[in-house]
Amino acid sequence: RNRRSADYRPDLRGDTHGDKFLHLGEGTRRRCNTRRQSDCGGDGACNGDNPCPLSASDSLTLLPRLGNGPKPPKIERASMSKAAIHYSFDHEHLLGIDGLHPLDLTHILDLANDYAEATRSGKRADPVLSGKTVVNLFFENSTRTMSSFEIAARRLGADVVSMPVAQSSVKKGETLIDTAMTLNAMKPDVLVVRHSASGGAKLLSRKVDCAVINAGDGTHEHPTQALLDALTIQRRIGRIEGLTVAICGDIANSRVARSNIHLLSTLGAKIRLVCPPTLLPADIQHMGVEVYTDMESGIADADIVMMLRLQTERMAGTETPSQREYFNLFGLNQDKLNRAAPRALIMHPGPMNRGVEIDSAIADDVEKSLIHIQVEMGVAARMACLEAISLGAL
Ligand code: CP
């Protein structure tokens, strides 16, 4: 049923130009050796100068691992003699980037790129979710994510119900779980959940029968934002591996930062966090990132400068001085941007506060700012996630 799950062919060229971009690190270009021939069944199909598909998957172990380690996807080695990998997205829910295997990430990015291309060329997507029902359950405000999921699901032929919390029975005292169980009784296929509590989406995934996609849970993760960010970078620069990405601002309260750290570092980017010490997360030492507490050195020579909003709704009020002083120290303006790489690109997940974390002229610079492309890619990334989660684990 998943037209994309069979015979998934990694791009063993290791380059990023062309319509597929599976980046597995330097290891993708390694040559087969005797030991690996036996791994492949010794059929001789990957000896000599032929790149070995197993080195592609094996090489993933060289990449940084975060969290508890991702569950490997289903890969059938029987088909290796054809240099093909039978891959399927083998996850019931999409709760975070942490826990996804690099092949899962590249599978979704590949699919999302196809959808981005199709949309730009005016092609209609196949209605692969026809007959399925997607419910958006948002306990926190959203402009981009909720509308983007709604459009994505409709483009794939699904029936969609969007439920902003202001119109739900939560306002009448109903608990998160009771609301979710009520919707579950209506037999949706996918529940897209945003909640202010870290772990909210995971909690629901244990209570309902359908697939759950995390659309942002507290300060924990926002996986589809990171996927759309990665897609945006891939399409603009052609690669992620080897880039220096400076994530600047309110890191401590940012689920976007956390998901991007997992995703971009897994795909080979070097991540710098740039923020006042009061806005650093407590578990920073486990993240495999560089930390800077001043913008000038933090964004020096960076290829991507990703600005984050000050999430005052999650703050105690003592983390930053006045917004004016914060802008002077950590807001992105042309002076600071001049320190970055000459062709550095600017990103922001939105909603953005002009004059607080970013100067308007920078945000609106069509040459350097990817902010509107990020929103566009959000639909493609969410189409890919909905397809993978709905059809992939079969
Ligand atoms: N980036 C993001 O999550 O935006 P919304 O809060 O508008 O969904």
Image (cartoon, grey):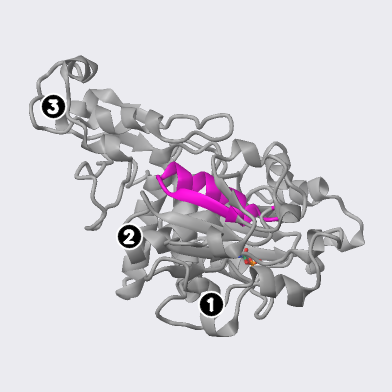
Q: Which amino acid lies under the numbered mark 3 shown in the image of this protein?
A: Cys
Check contact, mark 2 vs mark 1: CB within 8 A.
Answer: no
Q: Is residue 254 magenta?
A: yes
Q: Which amino acid lies under the numbered mark 2 shown in the image of this protein?
A: Asp
Label 2: how many Cα within 10 Å (few below 14, some 14–19, many 20+): some
Region of the chain picked out in magenta, as a range: 252-273
Residue at the spot of label 1: 335
Label 3: how many Cα within 10 Å (few below 14, some 14–19, many 20+): many
Q: Is residue 151 left or right of residue 114?
A: right
* Outermost residue toward the right in this view: 173
Residue at the spot of label 2: 114
* SS assignment at label 3: loop
Please tell me in which quadrant of the rendered image residue 124 appears: bottom left
Residue 319: percent from the left, percent from the top?
A: 80, 59
Of badges 2 and 3, nearer the viewer stands: 3
Residue at the spot of label 3: 46
| Cα separation between marks 1 and 3 | 52 Å
Tell me the quadrant of the picture where the N terminus can be found. top left
Decide which of 96, 136 is in the foreground and name it: 96
